[in-house]
Amino acid sequence: MAEEHELTFDDEVVAQLKPLLIDGNQLLLSYDDGVGPYSHHGLVALQVSFQLVVVGKDANVDDYQALIPSNLGPVRYKDYSGRFLGKQLHATFNRLMHAIKLSDEGEQIDDNVEVIVDASASQPAQSN
């Protein structure tokens, strides 16, 4: 049986991501291992690295078979990357470093989670 995960985004991360989650856009917690269309580095041997990727509703998410419930809705991830994730995940904004930190019950997983908006994603309207 797969381990159950849950992800909570703090208010500052919600403020960054919520405007991007429009028109059916999907949110991926992408393990940056070089597998799939949204992972390009493959530095897994050196460090554990994740990205938050916003993709369109019809984007290819075949590599992201698993779902984590979150306060922003379901977040897709590569099922095998769950081994790096605890049950109670937190994405918090570090103001000093101006970066998103991903942690679980007792450990920091990634201290610099990049937000990427894929070309397939609907873009928020620009205000003048």
Image (spheres, rainbow, N blue to C red):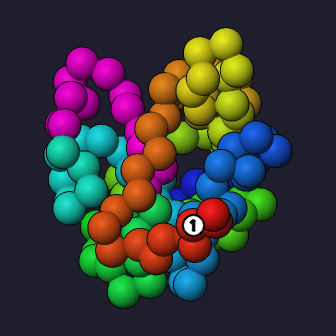
Which residue is depicted at the point 37% across and 28% down? 48
In terms of secondary structure, where does tag 1 sit? loop
Which residue is depicted at the point 64% across and 65% down? 127
Look at mark 1 in the image and give the residue it sits on.
126
Which residue is depicted at the point 24% across and 18% down? 46
Q: What span is colored magenta in the figure?
A: 41-53
| Above or below, comparing residue 105 to residue 2 in the picture | above
Give the mark count: 1
Query: In x, y percent, where is residue 93?
Result: 69, 31
Question: For the residue marked with disc 1, what is the amino acid?
Answer: Gln
| Above or below, comparing residue 5 to residue 48 in the picture | below
Name the magenta segment's main secondary structure.
loop
Q: Nearer the viewer, residue 35 or 57?
A: 57
Quadrant of the frame with the N terminus: bottom right
- The picture quadrant where one finds residue 103 is top right
Q: Is 32 left or right of 57, judged from the image as shown? A: left
Which residue is depicted at the point 57% across and 73% down? 125
Query: In x, y percent, where is residue 50?
Result: 42, 39
